[in-house]
């Protein structure tokens, strides 16, 4: 059936394996890793609190073809959030979930999202909570410096738990900062 409907005539059941040598300039290895399931960290309440989203969810919200046509809105009430937090190292650098390594992409991914959030709406106050800022590529440190100059706030801290105000839908993050001080801070979206 496949052979009959393939318009490109790409199916040939009579092919046999062959070995070829090909000169190439680069090889890309794509292991097909699966995204981390944030529900494995119940303290962050993903799937329970509407305003807790993953980076992939947030990318979709920012997309011009997304549910809000690229406008930055909270999923719970479609209001413009002014304080947004990104929590880094969820599902990486954590031996308890079998991933004691750095994913090496999240810091830059979150920085880009926070930067773009400010470009979409200059009243947004983005905060990135991180363990160690890992800028793995050429000029990535400069990009982080530009983001800070663009009022993206970086906080070296471990977020321990998120609580939701049932009336407003705002989210209280509890964390320990780099000085070892316990902190509480409210955000409209995480």
Image: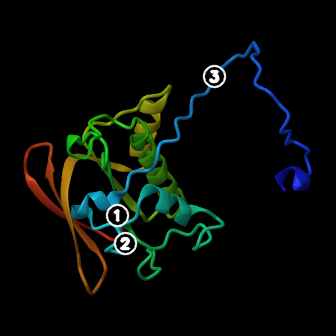
Secondary structure under tag 1 reads loop
The residue at which mark 1 appears reads as: 190
Q: Quadrant of residue 170?
A: bottom left
Closer to us: 62 or 49:
49
Q: Is residue 166 left or right of residue 76?
A: left
Bin the neighbour count of mark 2 within 10 Å (Cα to Cα): few under 14, some 14-19, many 20 and up.
Answer: many
**Which quadrant of the rendered structure holds the N terminus?**
bottom right
Bin the neighbour count of mark 3 within 10 Å (Cα to Cα): few under 14, some 14-19, many 20 and up.
Answer: few
Where is residue 75? Give x, y as percent.
45, 75
Q: Is residue 53 left or right of residue 187?
A: right
Name the residue rendered at 77%, 15% in the picture. 20
Q: Is residue 14 left or right of residue 118?
A: right
Q: Is residue 163 left or right of residue 86?
A: left
**Which quadrant of the rendered structure holds the C terminus?**
bottom left
Residue furthest bottom in the image:
167
Q: Quadrant of residue 70?
A: bottom right
Secondary structure under tag 3 reads loop
Relative vertical location of residue 88 with respect to residue 118 in this rendering, above or below: above
Relative vertical location of residue 131 with respect to residue 29 in this rendering, above or below: below
Where is residue 81? Give x, y as percent.
41, 71
**Quick check: marks 2 and 3 in contact, CB under 8 Å?**
no
Secondary structure under tag 2 reads loop
The residue at which mark 2 appears reads as: 51
The residue at which mark 3 appears reads as: 27
Bin the neighbour count of mark 1 within 10 Å (Cα to Cα): few under 14, some 14-19, many 20 and up.
Answer: many
**Quick check: marks 1 and 2 in contact, CB under 8 Å?**
yes
Q: CA distance from mark 1 to mark 3?
A: 37 Å
Mark 1 / mark 3, whichever is N-terminal: 3
Where is residue 79? Give x, y as percent.
45, 79
Residue furthest left in the image:
181
């Amino acid at each position: 059936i496949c052979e009959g409907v393939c318009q490109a005539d790409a199916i040939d059941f009579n092919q046999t394996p062959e070995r070829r040598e090909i000169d190439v300039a680069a090889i890309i290895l794509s292991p097909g890793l699966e995204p981390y399931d944030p529900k494995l960290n119940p303290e962050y309440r993903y799937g329970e609190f509407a305003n807790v989203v993953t980076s992939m969810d947030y990318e979709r919200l920012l997309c011009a073809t997304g549910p809000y046509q690229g406008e930055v809105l909270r999923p719970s009430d479609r209001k413009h959030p002014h304080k947004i937090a990104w929590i880094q190292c969820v599902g990486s650098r954590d031996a308890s979930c079998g991933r004691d390594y750095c994913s090496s992409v999240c810091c830059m991914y979150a920085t880009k999202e926070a930067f773009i959030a400010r470009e979409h709406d200059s009243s947004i106050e983005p905060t990135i909570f991180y363990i160690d800022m890992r800028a793995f590529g050429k000029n990535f440190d400069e990009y982080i410096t530009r983001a800070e100059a663009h009022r993206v706030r970086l906080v070296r801290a471990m977020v321990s738990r998120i609580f939701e105000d049932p009336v407003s839908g705002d989210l209280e993050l509890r964390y320990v900062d780099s000085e070892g001080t316990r902190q509480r801070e409210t955000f409209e979206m995480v």
